[in-house]
Image (cartoon, coloured by chain):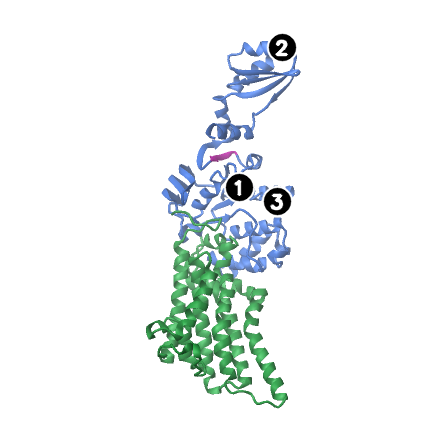
Amino acid sequence: MNAAPSPLATVRATALGYAPRVLQGRGWVLAGLVALPVGLSIVIFTVARLQGADGHPGEALKIFHEVLVKMMLPIMALVAAPAGIREDLEQRTLPLLLVRPAPAWALPLGKGLPWFVWGALWLVVGTLGLQVIGGDPSLLPLRLVALVSAWWGELALMTLVGLLFKRGTLWGALYFFLWEPMVRIFPPFLQRLTFTHHIESLAGSRAAEVGANQLLAQEQVTTHPILACLALLAFGALCWALAGWKLHRTPIGLAGSEAEG
Amino acid sequence: MITLDRASLRYGPILGLSPTTFELPDGGGITGLLGPNGAGKSSLLQLLSGLLPPSGGEVKVFGEAPFRNPAVLSRLGLVPEGDRLPTGLRADRWLRMMGELSGLSGEGLKSAVAKALATVGMADRAHLTFARMSKGMRQRIRLGQALMHEPELLILDEPFNGLDPEARLTLMALLRDLAEKGTRILVSSHILGEIAQLTDRILLLFRGRLLAEGTVTEIRQLLDRHPVELRLTGEAQVLARWAVEQPELAALRMEEGAVVISVRSPRDILPRLQKAAAEGGIPLRALDPLDLNLDAVFQYLTKDHA
C-alpha cells in the first residue's frame, strides 16, 4: 500500500499534469486578451509616431487601468477559472481524481496553478509592452505586482464561485462588471472590498481623471501598497482554501451531482 | 473486505439505494453486480469507492468508511462508467499524474506507468492525446489508471459498454487474470451474459433494492420455488395429456405442434420427462426451456418486485 501523497506533492502533480492545457485553445485566448489590446496600442502608437504625432503621456496609464485592469483581467478570470477544477466537474472526470488518496482540498489550487502562471506571464509581458508607449518606468514594478496579485485573487475567486454556484461564470461577471465599477461611489469601507481599490493603491490611480458621471463619487481612499498587495494575496489564498474545503466536503458522484450525505 | 449495514443513498427526494446489507469477504475473486439501468448499481459503487457517503446506515471497506479516506482509497481502484477523460492531455502524462496522486514516486512510479500501459495493451499508443483515441483505447486507459497502484479492490462500473467483441473478451481475460492473482473485483453490468461469462457470484439489484445474492446456482434455485416455462414439441395432444398428470404442473397452453408447460421444480420433472421420451411413452421431438437461464432468473425476480 502506498502512502497518501502530501498536499504539496498533490499540488505539484496536478499542476504539472494539467500544465499542457494552457498551451491549447483557451490558453491562447487568455494570452490574446492581454497581447491584443497592448499590441494594438503599440501599433497605433508606432503609426502615430511615424506620422509625426507625439504620444500622449497618459496613454499607457489609461490602457493599464481602463483596458487591462477593468476589462481584460476579469475576462481572463472568467475564461480561465472554468478550465480549472470546474472543468473536471462538468466533464465528469472529477471522480477519477477524487478516488485517489491525495487530499481533495489541494486539487483546486493544483489545477488552477498552471492557469495562474500562464496568465501572470502574459500580464507581465503586457505591462512591459505598455512601456513602449510611454509607461512610467518608476511605476513598472508596482504595476506588475498589482496585476499579478490581482490575477491571483480574481482567478481564485472565480474558482471558488465556480464550485459554489452552477452558474459561476454569470455570478462572476455580475461581480466584476456591476460591483467593481461602483468603487467610485462606494464609501471607504466598501471601496476596500473591490479589486480595483487595491490595484489602484498599488499601481496608482486612474490618471486622476474624474468624469461628469463621477461627480457623486465618495472620497477615494488608498491603502498602503504593501497592505494592498498582502490583501490581494491573502484574499486569493483564502479563496483557494475555501474552494478546496468545498471540494473536500461536497460528495460528488459519477454524474457530477451531489448526494444527500 | 466490504460491509454494508443498512446503507442507503438519497439524491434529494430520490432514493438511489434502499437500506442494503451485505458482506464481501477478503480475498480475490469477481463479484458481479447486476441490475437494469437505474437499479442502483452506480449508487452502490459510489458508496463503496468513497465518492459519496451513505445517507443512512454504514459502509465499510477494509474496515473503514471510504468517503475521503486516504487509507481506504489507496487500496482501491475505480473505473467509472463511460469513456470520459480530461481533454487535451496525453495518456502517459496523465497516468503519471494519477500515479503521483496515488502516492507513487520515482522509479516506482515510472515502472507502475509502464506496467499499467503494458497490462492494458497501450504501451505503444501512450503518447497519443485522449482526443485521438478510440472509445476502446480510452476505456483501456481508464482501466490502466485504476490498476497502477495495484489495488486490492477493483471496482468497475459497466466496463463493457461500447467495447467491441474483441476488446470485451480481452477485458474479461484481464479481469480473470487479476482475480486469480488475488485482486477482489466488483463489476457492474445490466447485461447478464457478460457477468455470467465472468463470474458465478452475483448481487442482483433492482429499483434500489438488493434482490438476491449468491452464486448463479443459488439464484437458479430460486426458480424451483417459481414456475418455469418449457416448450415440448411433438404431438401436442398426447404431450398435454402426459403433462396434466404431473404434480409440478402450474399452467399449460397449446401451440401449433407444441405444448408450453409451466412447472415448479424443473429439476424434478425434467428427469421424468426425459425417461418417458426415451421409453417412447410420449412423442417428444424437442424440449426448449424458455426461461431456464440467467436472463430468465433476472426477469423473474425483477418482475416479482416491479
Q: CA distance from mark 3 to mark 2?
A: 48 Å
Gap between marks 1 and 3 measured at Cα: 23 Å
Q: Please state which amino acid type lies under the numbered disc 1.
A: Glu
Of callouts 1 and 3, which one flags the residue occurring earlier in the amino acid sequence?
A: 3
Provide the residue span drawn in magenta: B200-206
Query: Which shade of the palette goes to chain B?
Result: blue
Disc number lying in front (3 or 2): 2
Relative depth, front residue between B210 and B71: B210
The residue beneath circle 1 is: B180
Percent position (x, y) of residue A222? Answer: 36, 79
Residue B163 tag number:
3
Q: Is A198 above or below relative to A110?
A: below
Q: Which residue type does callout 3 highlight?
A: Leu
For mark 1, does the 10 Å Cα neighbourhood hold few (<14), some (14 to 19), or many (20 or more) residues? Answer: some
Please tell me which of labels 1 and 2 falls first in the chain: 1
Q: Nearer the viewer, residue A153 or B84?
A: A153
Please, what is the three-letter code of the amino acid marked with disc 2? Gln
Q: Is residue B83 visible?
A: yes
Q: Secondary structure at mark 3?
A: loop
User: In which chain is the residue bearing label 2?
Assistant: B
* Secondary-structure class at tag 1: helix
Element type at mark 2: helix
Q: Please give the residue where the numbered disc 2 appears in the rendered image.
A: B237
Mark 3 vs mark 2: tell me if same chain: yes
Instruction: Please report contact status of discs 1 and 2: CB closer than 8 Å, yes or no.
Output: no
**Which of A161 and A125 lies nearest the eye of the viewer?**
A161
Residue A194, image x, y percentages: 39, 71
Q: Would you call the spot at circle 3 few (<14 residues within 10 Å), some (14-19), or many (20 or more)?
A: some
Residue A208 placement: quadrant: bottom left
The rendered magenta stretch, by its main secondary structure, is classed as strand
